[in-house]
Image: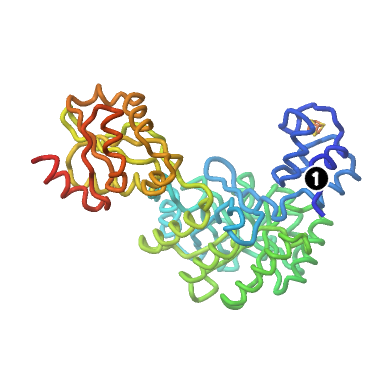
Amino acid sequence: MALKALDIYKLLPKKNCKECGDPTCLTFAMKLAGGKADVDLCPYLDDEAKAVLGATTRPPIRRVKIGVGERAFGVGEEFVLYRHEKTFYHPPGILFKVSDTQSADEITQVTIRVRDESFTRVGTKLQFNGIAIENASGSKESFARAVATVEESADLPLVLISENPEALALALVQVGTYRPLIHAATQDNYKAMCALAKKHGCPMVIKADSLEGLVSLVKDCAAEGIQKLVIDVSPQTLGDFLVKSTAARQLAITRKVPELGYPVFLDTTKTGMQDAAIALGIVKYASVIVTNPLSPAQTKAALTLRQNIYTDPQKPIQMNPGLYRIGSPGKDAPVLMTVNFSLTFFTLEGYLESTRIPCFMLIVDTEGLSVLTSVAAGKLNETLVRDSLKKFGVENEVTHRNLIIPGYAAPLSGRIEEATGWKVMVGPRDAAEIGEYLYTEWKK
Ligand code: SF4
């Protein structure tokens, strides 16, 4: 059963030494109670307290970091089975796969794609996370060469795929300090793999055909001192993956089988239905997803789906309020007011850019609510518009006093005119019609 903050506090050393990163033992206890901290952060806990606290306060899915540096990413530390219960916190890393049977040029090309390609959606830069290198040749020298080729082109998080500890040992000489994820320890090789993981400080995938097999491997690896694990449920089909990954998540979240509380690995190239596997993996609990290099269309679909699923459903994505410029607007340029709900902002911005009419966008702070909702809730009102015009110095930017407001804010037009002294023009309800509106109403 989960302990309350005060019960946890009683077990802490009460030194208030701040070494855990929190100002007092009580704040650390509160974080532990919320599953937001790890007991290992306090160096003064005795073994008994550690055992009690560790079992009840650790996030049900452990956090595992893959790689080092700017592009390193953390997975796991999830708390719910369904996204609407709270949110999903750590998006899965998606890695392109190369094989040591490919030429150095081919490997470099894929690596550079992952290093450089990105696109921006609702203000966030989206990109793939790293490279998975498979020892398909069976030769440890070829494997090490392929790993070195990737390493020469980019500092990216890596997954090294081989069940041969000797091949991995040679490859890790090239990249051991980058802490790649090594794949995979099985019942047959786990001792040698644990030794490698320990030597290089790498996280490690464990692989078994059944959840029982994984539980047993987790215990074996813990006995070897290895706990930074990712689990591979070895799916035979996509249905098999869905059943096993859901069961593992459920048993971990409810803490019925805490040994399954690790991020899940999915190699979509083994499923025969790669696109469907990527989508399923993103939605149903895969934390490290390996795929063959994707086309531009597949890239957009995968990264957009990941962004959507890992956006907090209870928190609208917001823009910073302010005065934004489209092109190089002059003193006679139109001023369009709208809310700071990011989808509204980016939709309107896109349509305005396509009109090629330089203009100003005045973004007011409705705490991320859409126009319709913020009008209904009273958040978008004449005072907010008046204060925003002043705060962002709009009067100094243009010589006219005409303000275009969204169609859905039409009921406020009179009050905004009264409060601001600006002439209000009611724009269209649909952002797609803004170009035609500007050409017919603004320019007439
Ligand atoms: S490190 Fe331990 S003793 Fe020090 S403040 Fe944190 S919880 Fe308290």
| Residue at left offset 10%, top offset 40% | 443
Image x and y of residue 353, in percent? 23, 44
* Whether residue 263 is situated above or below residue 415 in the rendered picture: below
Rendering quadrant holding ligand 1: top right
Amino acid found under the numbered disc labelled 1:
Lys
Residue annotated with mark 1: 4
Image x and y of residue 256, in percent? 78, 63
Q: Which quarter of the figure has residue 215?
A: bottom right
Q: Nearer the viewer, residue 90 or 353?
A: 353
Quarter of the image with the N terminus in it: bottom right
* Whether residue 202 is situated above or below residue 256 in the rendered picture: above
Farthest residue, direction left: 444
| Left or right: residue 262 compared with residue 394 | right
Disc 1 on helix, strand or loop? loop
* Whether residue 395 is situated above or below residue 12 in the rendered picture: above
Image x and y of residue 110, in percent? 43, 57
Q: Is residue 142 visible?
A: no
